[in-house]
Image (cartoon, rainbow, N blue to C red):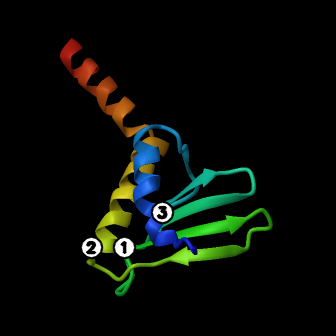
Amino acid sequence: MTTSLRSLVPVMIEKTHQGKIKWEYAGANNFTAQFPDYVLRIEFDPGSESVDYQLHIVDQAGNIIETYTPGRRSPASDELANLYELARRQALKVDKMLDDLERRLKDL
């Protein structure tokens, strides 16, 4: 049985929700999750006319081993957009910052 990267996206979403995948900021519109032998990298390209999101598996030498690139505005793209948003919010600590902002605003 061969597993596709696309089929793993729902699992990545679930594990990110559970805090079992830790995403880090890796540059503009680019987030990574480290594993012992490889890295997951998710990217958003707002300027592309054909692709919004890309998911890569990168080995220790920096080689892209596998890429998943759904077409723009497809259901699969929506699923990858969900993973990207979770990765972005986790890596940039968005929820923590919003909670802090709410607290500070209440204290004004």
Dot 3: what SS?
helix
Q: Is residue 108 visible?
A: no
- Figure check: 40 above or below 63: above
Q: Given the image, on which type of amino acid does mark 1 rest?
A: Pro
Q: Given the image, on which type of amino acid does mark 3 rest?
A: Leu
x, y (%) of residue 68? Answer: 49, 75
Which residue: 37% across, 75% down?
Answer: 52
In the image, farthest residue toward the bottom = 50
Instruction: Identify the mark nearer the N-term, 2 or 1.
Output: 1
- Foreground residue among 4 and 39: 4
In the image, farthest residue toward the right = 61
- Figure check: 19 above or below 25: above
- Foreground residue among 72 and 68: 68
In the image, farthest residue toward the front = 1
- Figure check: 37 above or below 5: above
Instruction: Identify the mark nearer the N-term, 1 or 3.
Output: 3
- What is the CA distance from the residue labelled 1 to the residue labelled 3? 24 Å
Which residue: 27% across, 78% down?
Answer: 74
- What is the CA distance from the residue labelled 2 to the residue labelled 3? 15 Å
- Identify residue for label 3: 8
- Identify residue for label 2: 75
- Identify residue for label 1: 46
In the image, farthest residue toward the top = 107
- Foreground residue among 97 and 72: 72
